[in-house]
Image (tube, rainbow, N blue to C red):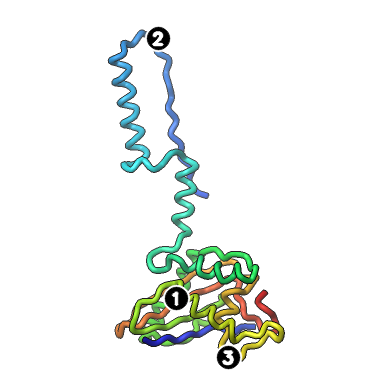
Amino acid sequence: MRILLLAVDRQASKSTRLAAERSQFRLRVDRICLVCILLAVAQISCLSLGADGSNDGSSDASASDTVTSNAETGRMVGFTEAHNAVRRAKGVPDLSWSPSLATVAEGWATTLEAESCAMRHSGNAYGENLYWNWGFQANPSEVVTSWAAEESDYDYASGSCSDVCGHYTQVVWRDTTQLGCAMKTCSDGAEIWVCNYDPPGNYSGEKPY
């Protein structure tokens, strides 16, 4: 089992609503007909809401769409919370997941996959942490825990590192508000993980928090 780390060192929605328009009946309707009408309305409502009946109204539908569009997916689930657990310990505001940053990370991870999971930075405008592992399937918690372990090599008073600590400082960089991550598996079974951050951290002469 092998692990490599690399960090950059730098200087809503459509609203729908079903409205049931009730007409005024001037003719008397017996109970049997009324029951038939109600059953028909209920059937139409179920078809509009979906087979699972999970949509209770337009507001809930909008909120659900928003959450889904901005949520981590697949093996990326847990990255945001793993970062925020480390940040909260330092009193730093939470990060939010950015689908656009995840797309950026995906693009670079794909490039590195084509290079047999080479460990090199993209040089883009965002903060960037890399993680490489071989011989096991990692998960977001393990990746972030590995980066956070560099805290022991960071001296806050002097703002310097006794060893590599740039992954840790990016994770807890106060001004960073968003992240997006991706992972690719290479032909030899190695995994390359990429996380991008906006605004970026690790500016020379500045402390993370």
Q: Nearer the viewer, residue 117 or 124?
A: 117
Q: Quadrant of residue 137?
A: bottom left
Q: Quadrant of the C terminus?
A: bottom right
Q: SS of the residue at dot 2?
A: loop
Q: Amino acid at mark 2?
A: Arg
Label 2 – label 3 distance at C-alpha: 85 Å
Amino acid type of disc 3? Asp
Total marks in image: 3
Left/right placement of residue 11 relative to residue 35 reads right
Q: Residue at x 41, y 63 (%)?
A: 73
Mark 1 or mark 3, earlier in chain = 1
Q: Nearer the viewer, residue 105 or 55?
A: 55
Q: List x then y, in percent, for residue 56.
A: 43, 39
Q: Which residue is mark 1?
A: 142
Residue 50 position by quadrant = top left
Which residue is at a point 45% across and 57% down the rendered structure image? Answer: 69
Residue count near mark 2 (Cα–Cα under 10 Å), binned few <14, some 14–19, many ≥20 = few
Residue 54: x, y in percent?
38, 43
**Residue drawn at point x = 48 percent, y = 59 percent:** 70
Q: What x and y, as percent, mark residue 46?
A: 34, 35
Q: Calculate the distance from the C-alpha at mark 1 to the C-alpha at mark 3.
A: 20 Å
Mark 3, residue position: 163
- Residue nearer the viewer, 151 or 41: 151
Write down the residue under mark 2.
Answer: 26
